[in-house]
Image (cartoon, rainbow, N blue to C red):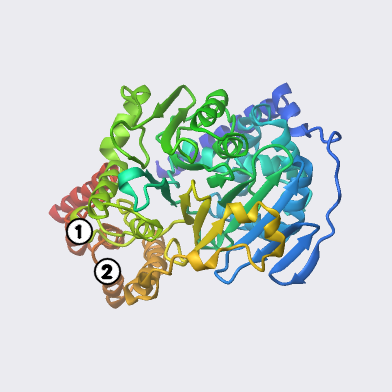
Amino acid sequence: MAVILKRKYSFNRVNSIAVILICLSIILTSCGIRKSVKHVPEVKQYSLDIPKVNKINDSTFNFNQNYLHKNKQQLWELYIRGNPLQLGYNNGALTQNLMQNQEEIFFSKVESFVPSKLKQNLLRGFLKWYNRKMYLNVREDYQAELYGLSRYSSGKYDFIAPGYLRSLYLHGAHDIGHAMQDLMMVGCTSLAVWDDNTEDGDLLIGRNFDFYVGDDFAKNKLVEFVEPEDGIPYLSVSWPGMIGVVSGMNKKGITVTINAGKSKVPLTAKTPISLVTREILQYAATIDEAVAIAKKRKVFVSESILVGSANDKNAVIIEVSPDNFGVYKVENTSRILCTNHFQSDAYKEDRKNQKHILESHSEYRHEKIQELLQKNKKLNPEKMASVLRDKSGLNGENIGYGNEKSVNQLLAHHAVIFSPQKKLAWVSSNPYQLGEFVCYDLNEIFSDRRLHRTELATSVLNIPRDPFADSQEFKNYEVYRKLTSEIEEATGEKKILSEELISRYRSLNPDFWVVYYLTGKYYFAHKQYSKAEKAFEKALTKEITTVPDRKKVEEYARKTVRKLKK
């Protein structure tokens, strides 16, 4: 019987794959796919000076007035100027090695998630179909810029898609990731305060960009200073190969930061959210102008965009989704907080949003920021940094390092602080948001005075490194992260680990529910049910991140009890 079932399973599996491949072949020969995969933007209208990059040393490169430099805090600083095509070429020529390395890191991560060659082929076919309308929803000047950038991408991944299309697809990777699998890799926190909530009464904005695709991906942080031929010069913090904006401020004092919301699975990709925020930075000088830009773009995920404005001395949250649009403004207060749920009237009856508030870690972090602001009545940049670096739970409870209920989840790609009226920006350096915050003055950088400076940063205003980054607790946390992979691997492969290692693992991060849940799963896989039961019971006494996570632990605890009763 077992043999028959196995053969039946194999037969059905082969047939299922055949059906999928046939469907994909039909899809891939459709008119919409052919047009999109062969699409190349029109760039003849732009003048172009092919960059001839001068290498000053291993950390400094230039071309005319465009340059790339790695500062002592290990942040890469890129200054580029020109028309859309020239911007792309200048960016690509200066960051070529960094960009190709970033692409390799990203695609190797995808390969680790999808190791099967067959599934990789299916994934490539699906992405071409899913992204078939993206180019119709991206501005032509941004397409020209991406085309210029892609001239410097590696040919190693042309089997996935040509360089230009890959560059376009990668700008939708964040959107696709959290829409298709609800990964919520961006569980960010942001806030804006002004008037009686700041020491000088000026608008002050802080954000953690908790986007994690591995340690290697976060190594080469890029602070871009872009002076476009058309529009407003701006600063953006992201990674090589990215022309979209996840955190940024323009010379007029408009700031943008994005926080992922709860999304339903969309049928097709449209405008990547980072290109919507890029457009806001490049063309908006007021909140009303920012709202108008966001309103006319078709997005394919749910996202909160916190927009600060020096001209308005105010901040709002633009809440976008494929089927809805709202703007959240605060009344009778001078602070606005943003985590990962919607707050405007437009989403009050949204069931997905309501469920997300009840079940996720978003509301908890929202309450934690309120608690921190009660303790810090008037913020300045240094105090804002301490808020962004806070690792505790409500009422100062120890909830474990890396808990997503913390404002500081110890996985941030970067943190930024903006002072829009002064045109000052502070960008965190590694590790996470614990390193020194480097200060940049946009008034200086986007002026002729830039050419006479020895460095872009205004270092006298830097915010010092967090002492926690040099503590034994932080060292323990980093070891805990490495051992987590070892525990998970041993669970999956049923490999035996020593009790000393398991005991050490728990001691490295003793307040975090995950250490007990994972060791419980390890014991369960090895049929050590008494030890598993104790581990799951211990996990349930800790601050578990989400309702679904708690249900997972409870289900394992019930399964363990049933095993013990047999």
Residue situated in front as seen by the camera: 383 or 28? 383
Using the rendered image of the protein, determine whether residue 158 is visible from the camera's viewpoint: no
Give the residue pinned by disc 1: 397
Q: Amino acid at mark 1?
A: Glu
> Where 78 sits versus 342, above or below?
below
Q: Residue at x 74, y 33 (%)?
A: 37
In the rendering, which numbered label is found on residue 506?
2
Q: Residue at x 36, y 44 (%)?
A: 194
Residue 396's x, y, as percent? 21, 58
Residue 32's x, y, as percent? 70, 24
Q: Residue at x 29, y 48 (%)?
A: 369
Q: Amino acid at mark 2?
A: Arg
Residue 356's x, y, as percent? 32, 35
In the rendering, which numbered label is found on residue 160?
none
Residue situated in front as seen by the camera: 41 or 307? 307
- Kindly indicate the quadrant of the structure image that contains residue 124: top right
- Mark 2 and mark 1: span between their CA atoms? 18 Å
Question: Dot 2, crowdedness within 10 Å: few (<14), some or many (≥20)?
Answer: some
> Where 109 sits versus 462, above or below?
above
Using the rendered image of the protein, determine whether residue 421 is visible from the camera's viewpoint: yes
Helix, strand or loop status at disc 2? helix
